[in-house]
Amino acid sequence: MDILKAATDWAKAELFSTPFFILFGVLFILASVGFWQLGKTDMAKAYIIPTLVAGALLMIIGLGLFFTNKSRITQFETAYKSDPSAFVKSELVRAEATLKEYRNIVFKAIPIIIIVCALVILFIDKPIWRASMITIIAMLVVILLIDGTAHARIDAYNQELLSAEKDLKN
């Protein structure tokens, strides 16, 4: 098994998925412009700022992840060639920390935030609050969809790292 190829393949797969954050960010910003130009009701006008902020956040997330993972591809080869064992250990630490973050943030905190936002929608009747909560829910659903696939990829990558660690010890 070539762990360098696995690491590179994982980073390339991440490069493929992170532009979806940017795409959804652009869609949220376009929705904001649409609400600004076409919104006639108070509810429609209330969506302008929340969708603009959500779009900007998704674009920032997407661009940050894209450039981080793009630089990793070249760093992987350098780190692996200098010390394969240290490379595997550092990647294992990073992958396991990322998996822990997914368990705590993506699969626990985000659903709780969605539930709280849904409750706010039920109990508060102000258009800006409702628009904000609906936009937050939509943004978090996008994050859950994209990060759900990213979680599966990093979990598979972590398994390959564990296997590579065993091979290096033998």
Image (cartoon, rainbow, N blue to C red):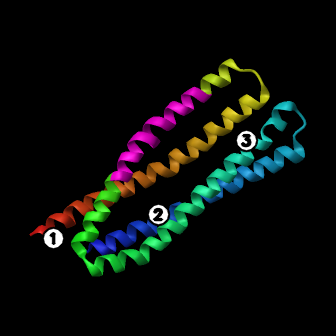
Image quadrant containing the C terminus: bottom left
List x then y, in percent, for residue 121: 67, 25
Write down the residue under mark 2. 14
Left or right for 155, reference 25: left
Image quadrant containing the N terminus: bottom left
**Taking the image as drawn, is residue 1 in sight?**
no
Type of the residue with mark 3: Pro
Write down the residue under mark 1. 168
Write down the residue under mark 3. 50
List x then y, in percent, for residue 91: 31, 64
What secondary structure is the stretch in magenta mostly built from?
helix
Q: Which residues are magenta?
A: 97-117
Q: Secondary structure at mark 2?
A: helix
Type of the residue with mark 1: Leu
Above or below for 91 versus 120: below
Mark 3 Cα shell of 10 Å, populated few (<14), some (14-19), many (≥20): many
Query: Picture quarter containing residue 78?
Result: bottom left
Type of the residue with mark 2: Glu
